[in-house]
Image (cartoon, grey):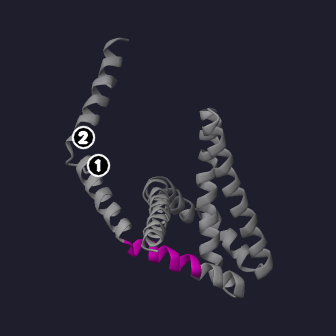
Amino acid sequence: MSILKKIGRLFLLAIQFTLVFTYIVFEEIIWETLARPIYYKIQSLKILQKLQQIIDRLNNYTRLLIFITLILTVESMGVTAGLAFLRGKIILGGVLYSFKIPLAGFTLWFFRISKDNFLNFKWFSFIYYKVINITEWLKSTDIYISFMKLILEFKKRFFSTKSSFIYEMKSFYYYIKNFKKRNR
């Protein structure tokens, strides 16, 4: 029986590792570097303030239908982009993903302004809080904490303004830029 417990623990550890790794990739790479700046840019647009007034007048079912449509569109664009990348169609995948990021930012904005309305649906509230609980659980795991320490160290070492890596990349960029000017 102890061998089954060990296998079960290894299996659960593998699932936990996969979930944590996936979450960190999306959180640290996609959200932090791409989606967050776009989200804040979208949020600051004046046209969205007018659009929010229109959305505020919609009933909960219409808001939910719009949100579900946006989510399905964003996710299908992501899956299609991923399949394009896997099939070697890098440009198509890149274009699809480039359109997905701003749409995802808009969808997040739409969710944030409609969240209280969505939570009036018991099923939505149940799913929302389950996702929040799972996210908090993932962030409390030893694997997540260890990964985050590594990522923070990596960022500090390679991407801080005092990093030799950044200095060398900037130097290389200016060298190439000046090289082009000299050869014109």
The earlier-in-sequence mark between 2 and 1 is 1
Mark 1 residue crowding within 10 angstroms, few (<14) / some (14–19) / many (20+): some
Q: Residue at x 49, y 53 (%)?
A: 34
Majority secondary structure in the magenta region: helix
Horizontal relation, residue 27 to residue 153: left or right? right
Secondary structure at numbered mark 2: helix
Q: Amino acid at mark 1?
A: Phe
Q: Position of residue 134 (x, y in %)?
A: 52, 76
Q: Position of residue 19 (x, y in %)?
A: 50, 63
Q: For the C terminus, give its image quadrant.
A: top left
Q: Residue at x 34, y 70 (%)?
A: 142
Q: Position of residue 57 (x, y in %)?
A: 75, 80
> In this picture, is 111 found above or below 95?
below
Horizontal relation, residue 137 to residue 175: left or right? right
Q: CA distance from mark 2 to mark 1?
A: 7 Å
Q: Which of the 4 quarters of the picture holds residue 46?
A: bottom right
Q: Are marks 2 and 1 in contact (CB under 8 Å)?
A: yes
Horizontal relation, residue 117 to residue 142: left or right? right
> In this picture, is 60 found above or below 25?
below
Q: What is the magenta range?
A: 130-141
**Which residue is at the front of the view, 95 or 81?**
81
Horizontal relation, residue 143 to residue 70: left or right? left
What residue did someone put label 1 on? 159
**Which residue is at the front of the view, 31 or 56?**
31
What residue did someone put label 2 on? 165
